[in-house]
Structure formats: C-alpha cells, structure tokens
Amino acid sequence: FALQTAQSFCDRTPSEALEEIIVVDDGSSPPLEPMLTAGVPERCRLRVLRHQTRLGLMVAKQTGGDAAAGGIIGFYDCHVAPRMGWHEEVISLLQARPQRLVIPMIGDLNVTAWDEIPGGQLLSKCYINWNADFWWYDDDTDFVPVISGGLVATSREWW
C-alpha cells in the first residue's frame, strides 16, 4: 500500500505545497526503496529512509520528522488516499497557529480503486476509555482527544 499512498499524495497535492514525500522503511524485507522508486515519478520528490532493523513506529516517525525539509511535516499511515484539496485546511491551520497538531480528515478507503468511498464516513476522531475500548465518533468541535493512528501534521517550528 505504500506505493499507492505515495502516488496519491503526489497526485493530489500541488507541487508548491509538497516539498517532498518521505517514506521511512522500518526494516522491511524486502526493502521498500526499489519498488517505490520504480513506481513513484521523480516529480514527487520521494525520499526513502531505511532502518536496517525494526525500531518501531515512534522511532520511524522521529527519523522522518527529523529529516523533513518542509515547513509543515505530515505523518500518514501507508493505507490512505487524501481527497483533492486535503492540504488547504492543514496549511491554513498551521499557519494560523504553528504550535499545534492538525489531524486531517481522511475517509474510508476503497482499496481496489485507491480512493475515498463516496458517502463513506469521515473517520476523523477516535475515543479510547480507560478500559482501552476504542471507537470512532464525530462532533462539531476542532478538538481531538486522541490522535487516531498515524494521521497528524505539525509545523517544522514546533517539531
């Protein structure tokens, strides 16, 4: 799924808003770089960073965030496809207040078409209680009590 995700971010983000796409390969076997560089066009400015052994999700995020060149750093799971214009609100919110985390709204994914399911639920917020019960919900606020998985962006300044 990493290839489709990288391609969808490249295709759905204007070049002036996309400094680069970084994929951190956390010790995959086989390594992801040959497949990604063969499938992602040069215009996407893809960089693949590799850990020789698995170091875990948080270390992979740290590796990618530290290496990022852009003013806004986004972290996305490798099984998402943003909708057109997805970046506009993320950029606007981080320009207004750089010391924040922004969670983009990415909807249910049709993995065959690699696109959002029309009319599908926007899984923007999750809730976890002390029993580790987890579920999705929506409300009319901009606040998110828990970051849902790997979808989050912040400013280079706050990183």
Image: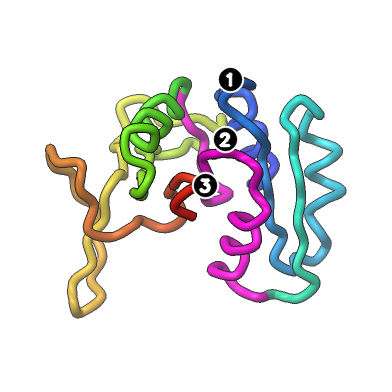
Earlier in the chain: of badge 2 and badge 1, it is 1
129 or 86: nearer the viewer:
86
Q: Mark 3 touching mark 2, by CB under 8 A?
A: no
Residue at coordinates 59% horizontally, 55% vertically from top-left?
A: 65
Q: Amino acid at mark 1?
A: Pro
Q: Is residue 50 left or right of residue 88?
A: right
Q: Position of residue 145 (x, y in %)?
A: 22, 58
Earlier in the chain: of badge 3 and badge 2, it is 2
Q: Which residue is mark 3?
A: 156
Q: Position of residue 139 (x, y in %)?
A: 13, 42
Indicate the colouring scheme: rainbow
Q: Which residue is mark 1?
A: 14
Mark number for residue 112? 2
Distance between the alpha carbons at the discs numbered 2 and 1: 24 Å
115 or 24: nearer the viewer:
24
Residue at coordinates 25% horizontally, 75% vertically from top-left?
A: 132
Q: Which residues are magenta?
A: 55-83
Q: Amino acid at mark 3?
A: Arg
Earlier in the chain: of badge 3 and badge 1, it is 1
